[in-house]
Image (cartoon, rainbow, N blue to C red):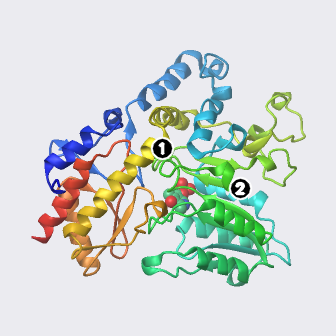
Amino acid sequence: MTDLHTDAHTAALDAADPLRGFRDEFLIPRHDGQPMAYFVGNSLGLQPRGARAHVETVLRKWEEDAVEGHFTGEAQWMSYHELVREPLARLVGAKPVEVVAMNTLTVNLHLLMASFYRPTRERPALLIEAGAFPSDRHAAESQVRFHGFDPATDLIEVQPDGPGGLFSMDAIAAEIERHRDRLALVLWPGVQYRTGQAFDLKAIAGLAHAAGAQCGFDLAHAVGNLHLQLHDSGADFAAWCHYKYVNSGPGAVGGAFVHERHAHADLPRFAGWWGHDASSRFRMGPEFHPAPGADGWQLSNPPILAMAPLRASLELFDRAGLPALRAKSRSLTGYLEALIDAGLGDVLEIVTPRDPAQRGCQLSLRVRGGREQGRALFEHLAAHGVLGDWREPDVIRISPAPLYNNHADVLRFARAVAGWRA
Ligand SMILES: *Cc1c(COP(=O)(O)O)cnc(C)c1O
């Protein structure tokens, strides 16, 4: 057997990696003259080399054509969001009519809840996970209040029943069952940001629907990470951002999914002119006729400059393909897990599920010995060009991203941890 800890071992794994060429498609920040081991794709993915050209094309069109840029060329701004529709649909396992790139994540959650969280006196409750990302909790709580209900009784927070904040399906099912007659909406993460736990979306949507509730997903940590089958999950809606695993830059335009069965439904919504049916939008009439599908939730004409890097990024996902990305991701994260098990267990405890089907790239690592130890290790790693991210009070999240990380990066992490302990 090859020794897990040797450069020869990682060199062999990386040489056999069919996606190894994609690393060169990214600009990897440097530290002391060499590329960082960058494990923060769950927070801000790296810049694809192709992003600059797409942004410059927009700037040049603005320079040369100004307002005419809306109507000139293959990437005319009038239909710019349509350029990403098909690759985006492939990325999340949806039909083209079900997806749109627009706004940002929390905005999209609100817009979609305006349509899919319709509480009544009999059914006022909105169910989320305890310990949700603060923005999701703020959004959910404020929606409950907005409709005149009381979060103390009508915002249901499912408590984790597993170690380190993990949820069993039984815990989720039991809480849905307990509130089944009062439940209006289940809003659940595809991957929980703190623990890295991935969920069976189809099973959760099935439970929500069986209880008579709607179901929406926050896919911030799942998109570009898991091989999603959003249409088949049966979810009513989903929202996500593109700056994490989708590598489209800080504050990149977000994404939204509305299931095909709602494509022509006359749902209440907060409307804007870009959601108006495209064929009659420019008649500028006073009445709102929604475009079919997810497009009908758009408000404003799209931020073209913010959408340009997304084109470059989606080209890479299309070329790599999700099955290959997922296979490499399992290899990288499995290697990280093996290195921790083989010799770093006295420093780090893996919070994320051990079952690869219940996680994506990320391992959440609790530093034994508490916050001060944790901060010291985190700073040591950063000083050695190994970048993870820190979650209070004692967790370091390490997310090897299969488009640009390799097994050598993972070994660098393990060596840096061992060096700190020594
Ligand atoms: C990253 C993330 C956000 C961030 O929301 P923005 O509206 O994009 O600022 C929200 N929720 C979750 C679960 C996230 O992971």
> Residue at image x 46%, y 32%?
319
| Front-lying residue, 12 or 167 | 12
> Residue at image x 37%, y 73%?
392
The kind of residue on which mark 2 rests is Gly
> Residue at image x 60%, y 70%?
137
Residue 392 vs residue 409: left or right? right
Q: Position of residue 311 (x, y in %)?
A: 52, 32
Q: Position of residue 131 (x, y in %)?
A: 52, 75
- CB atoms of marks 1 and 2 within 8 Å: no
> Residue at image x 47%, y 51%?
225
| Front-lying residue, 273 or 335 | 335
The kind of residue on which mark 1 rests is Pro
Residue 194 vs residue 16: left or right? right
Q: Sort mark 2 into few (<14), some (14-19) or many (20+) by Cα contacts within 10 Å.
A: many
Residue 234's disc number? 2
| Front-lying residue, 296 or 325 | 325
Residue 323's disc number? 1
Q: Position of residue 124 (x, y in %)?
A: 79, 75
The number of discs equals 2
Q: Nearer the viewer, mark 1 or mark 2?
A: 1
